[in-house]
Image (spheres, rainbow, N blue to C red):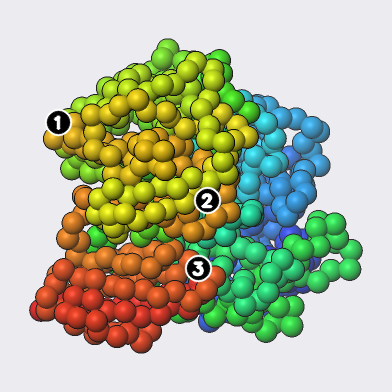
Amino acid sequence: MFRDKKGNTLFLLGANYWPSSSALNMWTEWNPKEIQDDIKRMKDIGMNCCRPFLYMPAFMDSSERVNALMIERLHFFMNQCESWELYTFPTFIVGHMSGEDWDVRWGSGANFISDSNVIAITKKYIISVIKEIKSYSTVLGWLLSNELPNYVGNQAAADVEKWAKEIIQTIKDEDPDHPVSIGDGAWGPEITGEQSGFVLRKLNKYQDFVGLHYYPRGMNPWHHSFTTAFRTRLAREWNLPVIVEEFGTSTTLCSEKNQAAYYRNVFYSALINGAQGTLSWCLNDFDFENKRPYSHHTYEERFGIVKTDKTLKPAAEEFQKFKNIASELIQLVFQQIEQPAALFIPSNYYYEYPSQFQPAFKQWYDLYLETFSLMKRANLDVTMVFEPAQELENNGQFSHELQISPEKNPVLFIPRMKLMTKPMRIQIDEYIQNGGKVYFSFANDSWVLDWDKLAGVETDCKFGIPDFYNSNSLEIRVKENWGSFTCGEKLQIPLNNSDPEYSYCLIKKTSGNVIMEDSSGSPFLIERSVGKGTVYFCTFPIEMLALASHNEQWKNTLSRIYGAINQTVYRDPIFSVEGIGTEMGVWQNDNLYHLVIFNHNWIEQQVVLTSRFSNWTIEQSTVPYVRKDNNQVGFLINRKSVCHLTVTKH
């Protein structure tokens, strides 16, 4: 989507920008020499773009006009970017920044989204700026805001959609040549699983690309590491280009070395999963004695990759290294090869149906991130399938059309099959009959019709009464050689009796093949042929149990189950990688292949790369490797590090 002056495709690689001496007061505490030096420094580091913020209280200090001095200074900034060919995404509405809201003086508490007078002033402001700078060749696109949901608070989705449509159409009328995005962080329910007025599927009708903002925290290092891949894949399914518009970490929260590790994590995972760029928060550290918001959000002063003495943190060195790899792979001569294993996202994840009769458990985002992470740990190439939502306020129309097919998505994983619309249930049956493979796990009080018939089981489920084993763990026995499992192998899974969501399905009999059974002889994993397809059913809600557990050994076993199912579809891939938590992207140009393998572990990881080619040569590798045989090589990848290989098929 994004191209430089010569027409070459760009993988956006840059930073959100404030000068070190002034931060959000950049335009009023003006230091042109510092800005010149920063722009040159960004280019020297290896960046090709930046995101400058037009602090709205400075640019619109009056409701009558845009401040002419601010426009003059903006021209200076843009001219410097032209000189160094640093592309830009000017951001107009900066009402929220770094933990505090910054209102324009003339706002008088009016609703920024719905007040007609405020909207008229906002449009006048934006168009005035666009008229001034749209001719600069380094303008790549326009961003309406910086995290507008933080500034405007809870808003009705209809009001937000109407506002976005009106503002973006006004921009398009003035400048049809540059793409526009909202700058809201893509915090809609389609990404976060939480209801919001900023509904991605609605706003995507007007904006041209999606900009993700996220700062993951939590107990699970895999959730943290795979957040970039997870959110990128979620956003991509709504049919617009995706960039990581804002990511980063303060070095008050981690070491400088581990800040660099996180940057590598985001860079390579974004590239592998189809994002079109990454912009870090932010370029510079700050050091103020008493300047809001930094005086009360002090950790905000250390998000930079350039220290206040202008020396570079280790994270700054990651830009050029990554640029050398990414700049070649995103050119159109290379085609990324994907072998999709689809993760099913039910419509109730992002759409709130009435009277859902939901239990207290609300960690839907964590559940699907957990499943996604487990699939990734098994080296699966995960895509998303969003069930269409039946929007009752829209006369029962569906949010989008979905036609799953064995050709497009040969295998579909449905953790905790709890809720599903009737049209989707019918389509799942047709998909399996036509040759698709479906895995699903048990959900207590499932509303999905005939799930037991789909699994080929007769259950002893009771209404309102969950079944539990009176134990904290359960032994599982493998009944046949299957995938990486051997007949007779014994596995231990953790149990949890604290909530009906963790209960299991008591089976009376099954028409399927029992691959694994528990210590009492009850089926644990069943395989059943249906038409041309196959159904795999797990009698425990193993993804829920995994989410509640810190037992990494068991989680690795669960990943092996996913891997074994995936191998029944992709029996002889061009390249495959083995190594827990390693993520691979493959790009092809005729007989030339580029492989990017990232190690998401916080420890060194042994990796085995297998090719179906009998005659292939590794022309270049960024890590030492050892040939195991004609088809395999092995190597070690350091923690949070990458291996880039260039391979030729003869």
The amino acid sitting under disc 3 is: Asn
Q: Nearer the viewer, residue 481 or 403?
A: 481
The amino acid sitting under disc 2 is: Leu
Viewer-nearest of labels 3 and 1?
A: 1
Is residue 34 found left or right of 502 in the rendered image?
A: right
Q: Secondary structure at mark 3?
A: loop
Q: Residue 575 in the image: x percent, y percent? A: 23, 67
Is residue 251 found left or right of 389 in the rendered image?
A: right
The residue to which callout 1 is attached is 531
The residue to which callout 2 is attached is 212
Which of the 4 quarters of the picture holds residue 619?
Answer: bottom left
Q: Residues within 10 Å of mark 2 (few under 14, many from 20)?
A: many
Q: Secondary structure at mark 2?
A: strand
Which residue lies at the image location 67% right of the left edge and 84% below the top edge? 311
Res. 462 mark: none
The residue to which callout 3 is attached is 601
Q: Nearer the viewer, residue 141 or 69?
A: 141
Determine the CA span between mark 2 and mark 3. Answer: 23 Å
Q: Secondary structure at mark 1?
A: loop
Determine the CA span between mark 3 and mark 1. Answer: 40 Å
